Image (cartoon, rainbow, N blue to C red):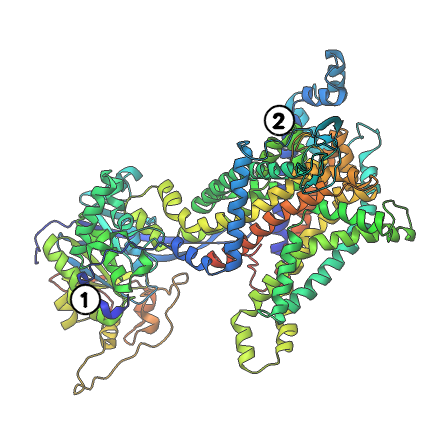
Amino acid sequence: MQKVKAEPILDVEGLKTYFPIKRGILKRTVGWLKAVDDVSFFIRPGETLGLVGESGCGKTTCARSIIRLVEPTDGEIIFKGKNVREIPESEMRELRRDMQIIFQDPYASLNPRMSVTSIVGEGLRIHEMQPWSEIRARVGDLLEEVGLSRTFVNRYPHEFSGGQRQRIGIARALALNPEFIICDEAVSALDVSIQAQIINLLEDLQSQRGFAYLFIAHDLSVVEHISDRVAVMYLGKIVETATSEDLYRDPRHPYTIALLNAVPVPDPTRKKEVKRLRGQVPTLASLPKGCRFHPRCERKTGQCEQEEPPAVDLGNGHVVYCHECKK
Amino acid sequence: MTAYIVRRLFYLVPIVFGVCLITFLLFNVVTTGDAIAKQRLGQHANQEQIDAYKKTHGYDKPIFVRFFTSIYDLITFNFGRSEVTHQKITSMIWDGMWPSLSLMLPAFIFTVMTGITFALFSALYRNTWIDRTIVVISIIGMSVSFLAYIIIGQYVLAYQLKYFPVAGYEWGFGVFKFLILPGLIYVLASLGRRVRFFRTVMLDEINQDYVRTARAKGLNQNVILFKHVLKNALIPIITQIVVTLPFLFMGSLLLEDFYGIPGLGAMALNAVNGNDFAIIRALTFIGAVMYVIANLVGDICYAFVDPRVELR
Amino acid sequence: MDEEKNTQPVTQEVEAKPGRSLWGDAFHRLRKDKFAVMSFVIIVIYLFVAILSGLDWIAYNYDKQHFKRDKNGKETTELDDYSKPSLGHWRKTDVPGRDVYIPGHLLGTDVQGRDVFQRVVQGTWISLYVALIMSMIYIVIAVFLGALAGYFGGWVDDLIQWFYQTTASIPGLLLIIALTFVLGKGLGNVAIALGVVGWVGLCRLMRAEFLKHKGRDYVLAARAQGAGSFRIMFRHILPNTFHIVIISFSLGFVNAIMGEVTLTFIGLGAKPEQPSWGRMISDARAELARDPAVWWPIVGATTGMFIVCLAFNILGDALRDALDPKLKE
C-alpha cells in the first residue's frame, strides 16, 4: 500500500469554505462562519488519509467542499490534474464518476421511495444510459461485492438494518468504479460490532479495487486501523498531519495528545492518567485570535494568543501547527 | 420588534404593487378595452360607440400611461363611478360594508366561540364516542353545499315554518329579525370546518412533550387543558381569525343575495350580472389590501405571542 | 431484519420476495381504516358512474322530455313536468291479467319533464370533469413553482413567493369572476379559473417540503452521483413529497364540486340545459317557491353531492393520518 512516490490524485491547497451570517431588513452579511479555513492536504492513489476532529470542526464541510456539494469560498482542489473549483458544472458531473462519497447516516442517505436498483444504479443510468435490465444485473453484482444478497435488488431501504443500508451506500459509491472515495463518518452511526465489519469491508474493497480514501471520523481509534496518514482538524484548520504510525507513536500537538488520551484502552492493568480538555469549544463564527486552540491549551504562551502558529516540519511528512512544538 | 414590524411593512410594498399589477393586467391586457366595451354596450355596438366608450374610460391612452394612472387611482382609492348606476364606488362600498359586517361579524364570533367549545370537548374526551361524534358531525356538515344550506334553510324555516322573515333588511336595531336566519345558516355551514381545524390545533398541542410531562407530574387534566393547551393553541387560532376578518367585510355573495341584505356581497353579484367592471375591480383591490393588512396584523400578533418567531 | 442477522453471512437469505415500497406500506395501513375503505369504494363507484355517464352509456336519457301517460300507459302529448318521484305502478286494464306497468321517475321530473335521477347521475360526470381540470391545472402550477422556489432559493424563491402571496391576497371568488370575464362563461372556463386561483396553498406546502428535503443526505448523494437539478427535483424529492399532493388532491375535489355550485348559481358555470348539480340546486330557488313545492331536484342533487363529498373528506382525512400526520389545513 505504500506508494510514496506517486503523484497525488487529490491535492487540496488553502481550501476555505465560509458561510455568510445574514441579518437585518436587507439581509446584509454581518459575518462569516468559517467552517473550513485554509486547509491543505494531498492524497496519493490507493492511499487512505484519515481526517479526525470533534464534531462541528468542519470535517464534513471539508469533504463536501471537495466534491462541490458545498461551494468552497477559496482555495485549489486539484483532482487528477483538474481544478475542481474552476471546471463548469457539466464537466464536474463527469468528474463525479471518479470521486464518490459514503455518508454518515445510512438512514438519511438512501432515498426511501426508491428501490435498491434505482439507488445503486442511478450513476450508471446517468453516466452510461444503460437499460434498467442491464443495470439490475450490475447492481446485483455490486450487492454481492458488498456482502448482500443479489435478491435484494427490488427491495426498499426501510426493509434493511443500519449495517445493510450502509452496505447499499457503499455499493452505490462503487457503482461507477471511482478512483477516490470519501467516507464521511461512514461508520460513526453504526453499532460497534457492525463498525468493524464495515471497516473490514472497506479495506477489502480498497485492496481489490485500489482506490484512495479520505476517511473521516471523530474518533482516532477508528482511523488508526485503516489510514496510511492522518490529519487532525480543529475548528476548521488542520493542526497536525503525520503517517499513521508516527502520529500514534509520537503525537506532538496538544490537541492530538488530548484526543489520543481520550481513546479507551482495553487493558485493565494499565492505569492511565486521563487528561481532560478544559473549556468550551469556541464557535466557528467567533474564533479566538492567534492559535485557535489556545483557550483550551495547557501549554499556551503569550505568543499563542497573538499569532497564528506556523507549520513545523518534523520530517517524514509529519507537520504540526504549534508555537510550542518546535523540534 | 420594531425592526420586525418595519421589515414586514416594507414587505407590503411589492405585494400591493403585485395586486395593482394583476388587477391592471386582468382588465387591460387579458381583456382589452374593445372586449370590455363590447360587453358593456352589447354585441351590436358600432365602432363609434366603442371608440367613445374607450375614450371616456381612458383605453385610448398608451399602455404604460394607463398603468400608472391605474396604480395612482387604486392607491388613492379613487375607483370612479359604477358603470350601471353611475354612483361613486367609494360611497357604494362604504354603504355596503355595514350591512355585510352586521351579518357576518356576529355570525363569525358565534361560530368561533361554538367551534372552540366543541373542539375543547373533542380534545378533552379525545378518542371517546363524544370526540368521534363531534368529528363525524363536523365532516358531515362540511360535505353539504353552502347553497343547499341556504335554499333549504330558507324554505323550511322561513317559508314553511315561518319562524323568520324570508328576506329583507332595515337600518337600525329592527334589522335583528332579518339577520338571525342567515346568521344561523352561516354558523351551520362553517362550523364543521372550524371545529375540525381547532381540534387539530389543540390535539397538536396536547401531544407536545410538555403536556405529557405535566400529566406525568400529576397535574389536573383540566388545569393542563385550560391553562396550557388552550393558551398555546390560541396562537394559531387567533392568527386564523385575524386573517379571516377581511372576508367578513366583503360579505357573502350567496347569503346576501338570498336574504336581501344590501351588502358588498350582493353588490358584487349585481356587478357580475350587470358586467360592471369598475365595481369588480374596486372590490378586488380593496379585498386584497384588507387581506394583506390582516396578514400583517396576524403575523405581528404571532410574533408578540410566540417567542420562537425570529425577530431579526 | 434486525442487526443480529447481519452477523451471519447475509447471502443466506435467498428468498426473492419483492420489496414493499413506502406507498405499499401506507396503503396497507389505510386498509385497516374501514371508513377510509368505504369512502374509497364509494369514490370508485362514483368515478365509474361518472365515466359511464360521460360516455353516455348510462343516464343517456337525461335530456329526453317525458310526456304524461293515459290510463293505458300510452304517452300523451302533454309534457309531464314536475311529476313526483315514484317507482312506477301497475295499472289495471280492461283485459284481466294484462295489467300495464307504468314506469315512474325515481326522482320525478323537472320543469321540462326531464328525469331528475338521470340528470343527477349525469351531474357526477360534470363534477368529475370540473374537478379533474381544476386539479390538473393547480397541481401542475403548485408543484412546479413550489419545487423551483424551494429547491433553488435565492431570487427564484423571492419571485415565486411574491407571486403566490399576491395571488393569495386577491379574494378568490372575485379573481375567478374576473377571470371568467376574460375566459368567458361555461363549465370548462370555470374549472380553469378554479385551477388558476387554487394553487397557492399547495405551492406553499411544496416549497416548504422542497426546502426541507434539498439539504437531506439522499439528495446530496444523488448530486454526488452526477444527477442534475431537474432529476433531483422530480425524481428524488417529488416522490418523497408526493403524499402532500395526494392529500391536497383528495380534499381539493370537494372544493371543486362546491365551487361549481356557487359559480353556476352566480351564472358563470353550467348553462341552463346542462345537468350539473349546481344547476339543479340553483334552480331549486324557484322550484321551492311553487305550490306544491318541487323539492326533488334539490334533494337529489344535494344527496348525490353530499355522499361523494363526505367520502372525499373522510378519505382525505385518512390519507393525511396515514401519510403525514403533521399536516393541518
Give the residue type that dot 1 points to: Gln
The reply, left or right, for residue C47 in relation to residue A274 is right
What residue lies at 59% left-to-right and 44% top-to-bottom? C165
Residue C159 in sight here? no
Q: Which residue is at the front of the view, A155 or B53?
A: A155
Badge 1 is on which residue?
A: A197
Residue B234 in sight here? yes
Q: Helix, strand, or loop for circle 1?
A: helix
Give the residue type that dot 2 points to: Val
Q: Chain of mark 2?
A: B
Mark 2 in CB contact with mark 1 (< 8 angstroms): no
Which quadrant: the C terminus of chain B? bottom right
What residue lies at 70% left-to-right and 23% top-to-bottom? B36
Give the numbered dot on residue A88: none
Question: Crowding at label 1, few (<14), some or many (≥20) Cα neighbours within 10 Å?
Answer: some
Q: For the residues marked 2 and 1, what is the alpha-carbon distance in whole angstroms?
A: 67 Å
Q: Position of residue A325 (x, y in %)?
A: 21, 69
Badge 2 is on which residue?
A: B30
